[in-house]
Image (cartoon, helix red, strand yellow):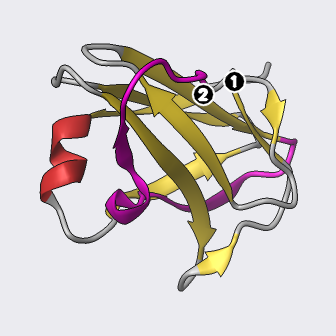
Amino acid sequence: MKIKISVLFLVFVGAFVSLSHAYTFPQLAIGGGYETVLIVSSKTNLNWEGRLRVRQGNNQRWVGTWSINGSDFTGVDSATFTLESWGSRKFIFRGDATMRVGYLEVPPHKGRYACGPVQPFS
């Protein structure tokens, strides 16, 4: 019997703008029955563009298969995303049969407010 375990993080975009360093979620577990769920919500009236970056060890690139919401990011350690004003996004991180651990960063210096419509991460 396979058990799926999810780790849930919830964050608000307003926090990214006020910080001068990356917002870090420690103890990310992906694969081997583990998945991580990140919910990002905007509490502003502006669209926001940012990046999600997965790391292992001491700031090392993610090694192994991983995906967000079914889109494969194997071989890449980050993904960009957009968040519409007053909106929320749910990101489900999954891997293969091997469990790997690391951490997730949302670098605020890469995020910016956008004027007008944005293309959402699929």
Q: Position of residue 98 (x, y in %)?
A: 83, 51
- Which corner quadrant holds the C terminus? top right
Distance CA(mark 1)–CA(mark 2): 5 Å
Mark 1 is on which residue type? Asn
Extreme-top residue of the structure: 87
For mark 2, what is the residue? Answer: 92
Is 23 in front, or is 47? 47
Is 74 in front, or is 36? 74
SS at mark 1 in the image: loop
Decide if residue 94 is on the left or right side of residue 22: right
Q: Is residue 37 visible?
A: no
Q: Is residue 108 above or below residue 47?
A: below
Image quadrant in which you'd find residue 25: bottom left
- Which corner quadrant holds the N terminus? top right
For mark 1, what is the residue? Answer: 69
SS at mark 2 in the image: strand
Mark 2 is on which residue type? Ile
Image quadrant in which you'd find residue 3: top right
